[in-house]
Image: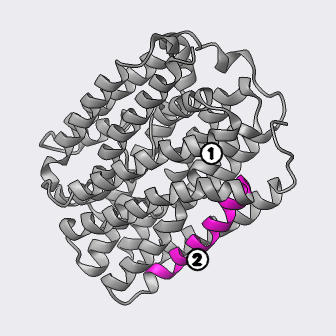
């Protein structure tokens, strides 16, 4: 069994790289593509909302799918859906194929994880490591994904916007091929999600509620919408936007390793909060910048800090619950994020259409600051290990 662990972890990381590249590409190009297709800012926001909400629904249903198909089968099916979504998105004509593509639940609207991928993979990572190395392993997992996300954003600078749906479909096909290499042992543990459920409000539910607030806030400034905002506010084209977001996501990637080391010194929760809080202050400052250059600098600084809570948050969640509840906690906390984020883009679109360009940033930053304070107060006295 120990000989299979590295293979499992390596395959999961490879899958994360392939998927994140596609998500990074679409994070720059999706809203721009919709704009080129004649969508208004409100319609773009509504489409982003639909894509995020569908991704959350798919994730919420993943436990039932896993019980029928196994984890490997669920991942293969989701990868196939990602490929089909790219194909539908690129079909000419009216908006109907685009709506169907969003409804498949695997179309990333702003670099967020959608579909069942992350919940299943994070559970696999947790199974592959010890509690002492979990933060480092999650850092590697997220580091690989963040670099791929950055490369996907950079690819948007050279791939014509009209060809991004095809590129996304190819990523889905490549992801399917990677999941075929998963060990068959993933088929055998589908009962975990239904064997045990907390009967009262526990750590998983409290964390999911708080993560939902954070995701709701992030939904106001999803990366695809952020690229569109920079385009509208400063006239930046897809080439320069791809370069800027490549730099931002590269800084995010590097921050994961810093987060893993910092968590060993000050703890997981402290790393989550003390890096996230200043990043949200910077988020509120972005719309106050007078030029594209100054806004980009603030964004870079914000991205260097904003994702340090990702590997620590995942490790914290896995440590806060009993091992038999990890699948449930991963599914719940991952499902709530796209569901909560789905509410916001439509309102960001309305704000932009009404010329309130700064409002989404202020709402997002304010809610995220409130989340940081709330999670620190709720869990600062939590003893190590599951409740």
Residue 51 % position (x, y): 39, 44
Give the quarter of the image for residue 189: top right
Within-10-Å neighbours for mark 1: few <14, some 14–19, many 20+: many
Q: In which quarter of the image is the N terminus?
A: top right
At x 54% / y 33%, what residue is drawn? 119
Within-10-Å neighbours for mark 2: few <14, some 14–19, many 20+: some
Q: Tell which tag, 1 or 2, sits nearer the viewer.
A: 1
At x 32% / y 83%, what residue is drawn? 293
Tag shown at residue 281: 2
Secondary structure under tag 2 reads: helix
State left or right for residue 74 relative to residue 204: left
Which region shows up in magenta? 267-286
At x 41% / y 46%, what residue is drawn? 145
374 lies above or below 116: below
Q: In which quarter of the image is the C terminus?
A: top right
Residue 284 is covered by the magenta coloring: yes
Tag shown at residue 135: 1
Name the N-terminal-most of marks 1 and 2: 1
Residue 65 visible somewhere in the drawing: no
211 lies above or below 245: above
């Amino acid at each position: 069994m120990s000989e299979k662990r590295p293979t499992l972890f390596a395959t999961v990381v490879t899958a994360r790289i392939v998927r994140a590249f596609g998500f990074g590409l679409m994070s720059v190009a999706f809203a721009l593509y919709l704009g080129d297709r004649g969508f208004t800012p409100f319609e773009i926001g509504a489409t982003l909302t639909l894509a995020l909400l569908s991704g959350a629904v798919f994730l919420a249903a993943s436990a039932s799918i896993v019980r029928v198909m196994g984890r490997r089968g669920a991942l293969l099916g989701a990868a196939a859906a990602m490929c089909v979504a790219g194909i539908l998105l690129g079909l000419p004509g009216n908006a109907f194929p685009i709506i169907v593509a969003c409804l498949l639940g695997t179309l990333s609207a702003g670099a967020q994880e959608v579909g069942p991928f992350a919940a299943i993979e994070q559970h696999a990572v947790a199974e592959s490591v010890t509690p002492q190395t979990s933060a480092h392993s999650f850092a590697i997992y997220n580091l690989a994904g963040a670099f791929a996300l950055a490369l996907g954003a950079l690819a948007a600078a050279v791939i014509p916007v009209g060809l991004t749906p095809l590129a996304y479909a190819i990523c889905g096909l490549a992801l399917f091929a990677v999941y075929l290499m998963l060990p068959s042992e993933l088929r055998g543990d589908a009962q975990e999600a239904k064997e045990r459920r907390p009967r009262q409000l526990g750590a998983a539910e409290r964390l999911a509620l708080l993560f939902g607030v954070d995701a709701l806030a992030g939904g106001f400034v999803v990366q695809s919408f952020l690229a569109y905002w920079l385009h509208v506010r400063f006239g930046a084209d897809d080439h320069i936007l791809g370069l800027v977001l490549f730099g931002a996501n590269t800084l995010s990637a590097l921050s994961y390793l810093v987060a893993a080391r910092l968590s060993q010194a000050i703890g997981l929760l402290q790393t989550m909060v003390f890096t996230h809080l200043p990043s949200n202050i910077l988020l509120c400052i972005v719309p106050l910048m007078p030029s594209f250059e100054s806004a980009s600098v603030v964004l870079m600084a914000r991205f260097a800090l904003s994702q340090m809570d990702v590997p620590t948050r995942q490790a914290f969640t896995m440590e806060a619950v009993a091992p038999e509840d990890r699948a449930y906690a991963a599914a719940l906390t991952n499902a709530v994020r796209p569901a909560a984020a789905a509410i916001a883009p439509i309102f960001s679109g309305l704000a932009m259409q009404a010329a309130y360009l700064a409002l989404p940033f202020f709402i997002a930053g304010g809610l995220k600051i409130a989340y940081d304070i709330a999670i620190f107060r709720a869990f600062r006295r939590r003893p190590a290990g599951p409740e």
